[in-house]
């Protein structure tokens, strides 16, 4: 897509700190890292959200993500890491080319969570389950 910053990075039209590439995916350092080695992994093809990826693209991402995560953890010495993947503005997505964040975690990183669990009303869990199972058949 002509006005997509990540498409331009993949095409080499604007500079990036490339970490890895193959024929399906491209990984580069985040320009505003939450911690050193914060890396982004994207498919070469422009799609906005995760659910728009093909099975082959998903497989290509799945093959690379663990290796990237291991490398990020190894060179930073982080005790752990988060894989963050935002879909849609309401979920915090700013760049509308699907991407996976690999964020090493340490005491001084810039990532925070708000996580307030709720409860299903009686019977609602079974109704939701039936809807999901039905949606997966289509
Ligand atoms: P998200 O909120 O999930 O859409 O995250 C977008 C990420 O892209 C942010 O962490 C930005 O710092 C990063 N970003 C934006 N522009 C660039 C760029 N030119 N090179 C590298 N990372 C970028
Ligand atoms: Zn794009």
Image (tube, rainbow, N blue to C red):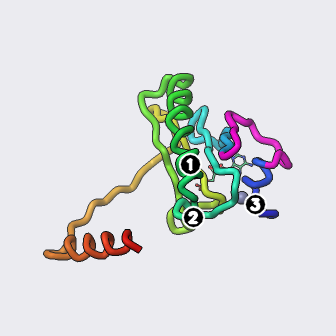
Compared with residue 111, is residue 116 higher up or lower down, i.e. above or below? below
| Cα–Cα gap, marks 1 and 3 | 16 Å
* In front: label 1 or label 2: 2
Q: Residues within 10 Å of mark 3 (few under 14, many from 20)?
A: few
Q: Split into 4 quadrants, where in the image is the N terminus?
A: bottom right
Asked which quadrant contains residue 133, the reply is: bottom left
Q: Residue at x 37, y 73 (%)?
A: 135
Give the class, few, some or many, for how many residues have Cα within 10 Å of label 2's Cα (few <14, many ≥20): few
The residue at 32%/74% (across/down) is: 134
Mark 1 and mark 2 lie on one chain; the one further toward the N terminus is: 2
Q: Dot 1 corresponds to which residue? A: 100
Asked which secondary structure carries label 2, the reply is helix
Image location of residue 5, percent across then percent down: 76, 56
Q: Position of residue 60 (x, y in %)?
A: 58, 45
Residue on which disc 2 sits:
52
Q: Are marks 1 and 3 in contact (CB under 8 Å)?
A: no
View extreme (left): residue:
122
Q: Check the image and report above or below for 38 versus 5.
A: above
The magenta segment is 11-24
Residue at the spot x=56%, y=38% of the render?
64
The secondary structure that dominates the magenta segment is: loop
| Closer to viewer: mark 3 or mark 2 | 2
Name the image quarter holding residue 102: top right
Q: Is residue 70 above or below residue 99?
A: above
Which numbered disc covers residue 4?
3
Q: Secondary structure at mark 3?
A: loop
Q: Residue furthest right?
A: 13
Element type where label 1 sits in the image:
strand
* Left or right: 22, with 122 as reference point: right
**What separation in Å lies between label 3 and label 2 (alpha carbons)?**
16 Å
């Amino acid at each position: 897509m002509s006005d997509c910053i990540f498409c331009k990075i993949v095409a080499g039209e604007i500079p990036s700190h490339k970490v890895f590439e193959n024929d399906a995916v491209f990984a580069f350092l985040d320009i505003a890292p939450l911690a050193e080695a914060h890396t982004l992994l994207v498919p070469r093809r422009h799609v906005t959200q995760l659910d728009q990826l093909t099975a082959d693209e998903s497989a290509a991402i799945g093959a690379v993500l663990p290796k990237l995560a291991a490398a990020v953890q190894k060179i930073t010495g982080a005790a752990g890491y988060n894989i963050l993947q935002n879909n849609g503005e309401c979920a915090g997505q700013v760049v509308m080319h699907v991407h996976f964040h690999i964020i090493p975690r340490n005491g001084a990183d810039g990532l925070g969570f708000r996580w307030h669990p709720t409860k299903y009303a009686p019977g609602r869990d079974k109704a939701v389950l039936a809807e999901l199972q039905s949606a997966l058949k289509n």
